[in-house]
Amino acid sequence: PPCPEAATGWEVAETAEVVTQTPKCPEAAMGWEVVATAEVATQTPPCQEAEMGWVQAATAEVAAERPPPCPEAATGWEVAETAEVVTQTPKCPEAAMGWEVVATAEVATQTPPCQEAEMGWVQAATAEVAAERPPPCPEAA
């Protein structure tokens, strides 16, 4: 996807095992990182506001899944999806509201602690919970 206005450059590395696209637009701490394996094509949602970074890695089982849009003041998202573990851990550090959700095959736990400083989300899901998405962060947690 096209980087925002002040984008500086793109880095693309392709190997026989993995196809990696790492476009970066440094302005306002805005960065992109897209990792797609030979078995799956991963789509990365568009950059939104300043200081927003996205990292998405997906396997063939949950290739179609995308992370929900970050709130305005969000800093970054990380989405990792594997077929071995069933885990969802969205995090947005404290002073900017935070959530943390962990779900496994044996137990489903939701613990939204607010952390500190900036906002970041981390989501890992498998084919079993691929459709699950973290709830949006409240405005002033």
Image (cartoon, grey):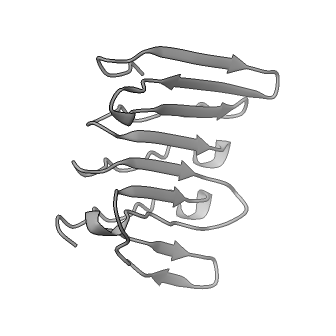
Q: Residue at x 59, y 51 (%)?
A: 80
Does any portion of residue 54 appear in the rendered image? yes
Residue furthest toward the top?
9
Does any portion of residue 43 appear in the rendered image? no
Residue furthest toward the right?
16
Q: Quadrant of residue 117?
A: bottom left
Q: Relative to 56, is 109 above or below?
A: below
**Quadrant the N terminus occupies:** top left
Q: Position of residue 36 (x, y in %)?
A: 64, 32
Q: Position of residue 116 (x, y in %)?
A: 36, 67
Q: Quadrant of residue 134?
A: bottom left
Closest to the observer, 103 or 46? 46
Q: Residue at x 28, y 36 (%)?
A: 50
Q: Position of residue 75 (x, y in %)?
A: 35, 48
Q: Position of residue 28 (x, y in %)?
A: 33, 32
Q: How many marks?
A: 0
Q: Relative to 35, is 110 above or below?
A: below
Closest to the observer, 22 or 67? 22
